[in-house]
Amino acid sequence: MVIIMNPDATRENIENVVEVIENAGLEAKVMEGTQQKIVGVIGDKTKLGQTPFGAMDGVEKSVEISKSYKLASREFHPKSTVVDVDGVKIGDGNFVVMAGPCAVESREQLFEAADIAKKGGAQMLRGGAYKPRTSPYSFQGLGEEGLKYLAEAKERTGLKIVTEVTEVETVEQVAYYSDLLQIGARNMQNFRLLKEAGRCNKPIMLKRGISATLNEWLNAAEYIMNEGNQNVILCERGIRTYETYTRNTLDLSAVPAVKHLSHLPIVIDPSHGTGKWRMVKPMAFAAVASGCDGLIMEMHPNPAKALSDGAQSLTPENYLSLMDGVKKIHSFLEDEGLLLKTV
Ligand code: PEP
Ligand code: MN
């Protein structure tokens, strides 16, 4: 952290700042140029707590140099994290696909989707039992009944289960039936939920908030990790911009950025990222080339009849053709040595 002083700051102003820093057991380094005077803080700045330097006489502002998230940061943990989802490893260079309907609607619908997901080569089945819908009148999910169908679908296919948890009260229940707990975009900064997820013994997939910066997203991951759960997978699912043609703007640049800033694996959701099934395949292909660790996509046996997100859901046929392309692109990039190497 550095404290930038006003050009007209007095010697006394600077000494006061130095005193606060030294009283916290840290070292202060005063640098005086012809125009600017700054005070550098050396040491663990958490010892300073929330000291409001900006309120002190002669101070222009304080600027953070190191990241506020530590556990999620690559700076403090250079080696990439590999998350083990009941035997499926994410972040070790393999490409992991999670596919299935937006919502679990019935046993038949889910089993049909699961069989197709498996046929295409996905390793995980997605499906929401608790649905955070924009409108309270939309289908809200089957709740525990849906979770039971997911667990049955796992027994039937061997696919690992990823499903969303929306409330602190159901974390334990969702963890009981599934292998990977999804925290959705709308709950990215639900700090009580993040902390509860951090205390559960299953890995967490944390989706990027609808308008979240990378810094806010990684700090949200920090909340989970700070409670003891280091098994966090990030999911870029598009952010809100001024564009209205697509449901969201898929920020594929988040992949190299997150890989640089953090050691956590990152997957791409081209379904919510675009809101249009036609755009899912090209974005999935681009996601593979971006160096991400996998995809999560919506696929429905009959999208026209889907109770949620039908417009962005792939038909079985489109899903199978997409998976064929994803596998080819991934092995081509791998063979040519073009995939980002895991550190
Ligand atoms: C979902 O995965 O169905 C979902 C609601 O996603 P998001 O939180 O990204 O909107
Ligand atoms: Mn959805």
Image (spheres, rainbow, N blue to C red):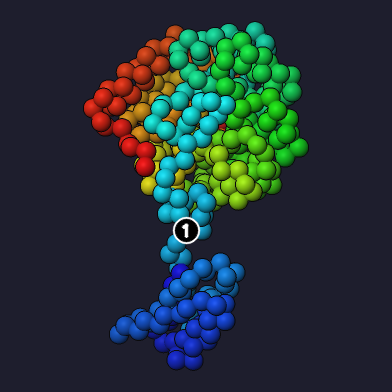
Instruction: Please give the name of the residue rendered at 56% of the width and 43% of the height, measured from the top-left corner.
Output: 230
Figure quadrant, ligand 1: top right
Quarter the C terminus occupies:
top left
Q: Quadrant of residue 52?
A: bottom right
Position of residue 267 measured from the top left corner of the image (x, y, whole percent): 46, 33
Instruction: Please give the name of the residue rendered at 49% of the width and 91% of the height, measured from the top-left corner.
Output: 12
Instruction: Please give the name of the residue rendered at 25% of the width and 31% of the height, measured from the top-left corner.
Output: 337
The answer to whether residue 102 shows anywhere in this view is no
Q: Quadrant of residue 94?
A: top left
The answer to whether residue 291 shows anywhere in this view is yes
On screen, 195 above or below 138? below
Position of residue 210 measured from the top left corner of the image (x, y, whole percent): 53, 41
Q: Looking at this rendering, what residue extends furthest in the right direction?
A: 169
Mark 1: C-beta under 8 Å from nearest atom of ligand 1? no
Residue for badge 1: 67
Q: Nearer the viewer, residue 4 or 147?
A: 147
Position of residue 167 measured from the top left corner of the image (x, y, whole percent): 71, 37
Instruction: Please give the name of the residue rendered at 58% of the width and 36% of the height, measured from the top-left corner.
Output: 204
Position of residue 313 measured from the top left corner of the image (x, y, whole percent): 51, 19
Label 1: state its secondary structure: loop
Q: Nearer the viewer, residue 330 or 297?
A: 330
Q: Nearer the viewer, residue 266 or 314?
A: 266
Q: Amino acid at mark 1?
A: Lys
On screen, 80 above or below 128? below
Relative side of 213 to 154, left or right: left
Relative side of 225 to 326, left or right: right
On screen, 70 above or below 333? below
Q: Nearer the viewer, residue 336 or 301?
A: 336
